[in-house]
Amino acid sequence: MDGGVAGPRRPGTLRGVGVGPGDPELVTVKAARLIGAADVVAYYSARHGRSIARSTAEPYLRDGQLTEPLVYPVTTETTDHPGGYEAAITEFYDASAERLAAHLSAGRDVVVICAGDPMFYGSYMYLHERLAHRFPAEVVPGVTSISAATAVLGRPLVERDEVLTVLPGTLSADELTRRLADTDAAAVLKLGRTFPQVRAAFADAGRLADAWYVERATTETGRELPLAEVDPDGVPYFSLAVLTSPTGAAVAASVDPAPGVDGSTASTVPAASTVPAASTGVGVPAGGVTVVGLGPAGSRWLTPETSQALREAEHLVGYGPYVDRVPHRPGQHRHTSGNQVEIDRARHALELALAGARVAVVSSGDPGVFAMATAVLEVATTDDRFGTVPVRVLPGLTAAQAAASRIGAPLGHDFAVLSLSDRLKPWAVIEQRLAGAAAADLVLALYNPASASRRWQVDAARKVLLRHRSADTPVVVARDVGRPGERITVVPLAELDPSDVDMRCLLIVGSSTTRTDRRADGSTVVWTPRTYPG
């Protein structure tokens, strides 16, 4: 034989292998084969040494395999690393990658086992991005916790055109609320210490009654129950909150449980937390109209009942800018129109409902305060065609309430609400009512004070009020309350400048007892005492 020179050593192959949610029988055939054949099996663990991934893969390990426990230097506790948590964890991933690189360079095949799926919130990905350009690498998918959760619940996750949103519980409460209100189905992972804010976000989005909690799905210690019933103490990191298909939930609620062997109606599937809207009065009834108030601005000011009605409606009807504030949903039809065709809009909504559709008519603020509820009821009660169409009105936060809250409590005693718009009633009536309310010493909340074509009414109203109120009566000018351009100012009645007021404003005019105070922190508050002199 002629002597030769040995070639370069073949590097080992790196494999990120998902072992699923915890049940060893849910490990895929390929994952089991690769785990058993690997020279080195690596897994993450906290400092206590326990690893869900390792315990799941235990039946597929073989004697003589090398193991590499990758122990996190920090999990939920604080760190004294000079660069903080991010620097500590980056340093850990760098060091872990180099430990595995030594094995790969020596020709050993390395399997990194991960709970769930390696590329779905999996820590394997941080090794992959450090090593895959240096060594052969392969990723083997696993059953995700979301799939496991919906399996143990026995509920479809999404159907047809429904949208699924996956969220980490570490998002801010406002962001969680916004996204939960704007989806059909959702899964929120990484609970543990984030659980209280996650549950609050479900409540603020109006979705708490429909949400489920699943802990350690498919394992012997797993459990599932309605999210609203969960004790926040002891919620583990490996748990999730789930909103399943709204279509599936409604169907599940309307189907009788299958009879058991003994003729009973026992079921292993948890009872649905929602039932069809037509039978509960919640949401939008089939073949009916629900008039809803969106509040002044923002999903955080929507009531849970309104949020549900908006989700369940097949048709949205309303003034264009208001409809635009409602998140788009697949399959939902939107019908927008101008600001001065309320009766036509109401008739269109009732005609859709008469044909069997679930219709939501949207208003800003509260639908019964200078808004669409009156228009819908006017048509529904005067046109015999709509006599059998269900009409419901859901309340919303009014502009007056929102404006008052921003400056203190100017509505703390008796008050009156008037509109300065003379489009639907003559100015003489408005002037008479202003004078009467002012003479009665009521605080006044004035809606629709001005518009592009109505510029004189504010000055005219000010003159009427000055006949009965002192010149220094505080007036709150609230503009774009709850929106990015919000501005709240307080001026004496005599100095109210009509040029500062438009249709996006609401005015609150104090009574003789209303006070304006400057607090020690520099803020100004306007409030009306609950007691009245004399």
Image: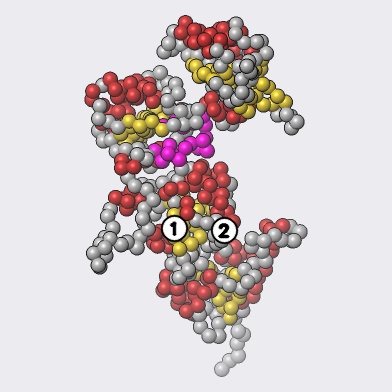
Residue 113 appears at what percent x and percent y? 53, 71
User: Which sits in the foreground, 233 or 53?
Assistant: 233
Label 2 to label 1, Cα distance in Å?
15 Å
Q: How many marks?
A: 2
In this rendering, would 78 be left or right of 476?
right
In x, y percent, where is residue 449?
53, 16
Q: Residue at x 42, y 25 (%)?
A: 368
Q: Is residue 252 above or below residue 384?
A: below
Query: Helix or strand or loop: what does disc 2 sit on?
Result: loop
377 is higher (above) or lower (below) than 178? above
**Identity, as a three-letter code, of the amino acid under mark 2:** Asp
Residue under the image location 74 percent in, 32 percent down: 521
Q: Residue at x 60, y 6 (%)?
A: 467
Amino acid under disc 1: Leu
Q: Which residues are magenta?
A: 292-309
Q: Which residue is mark 1?
A: 225
Q: Quadrant of the N terminus?
A: bottom right
State the image quarter where residue 305 is shown: top left
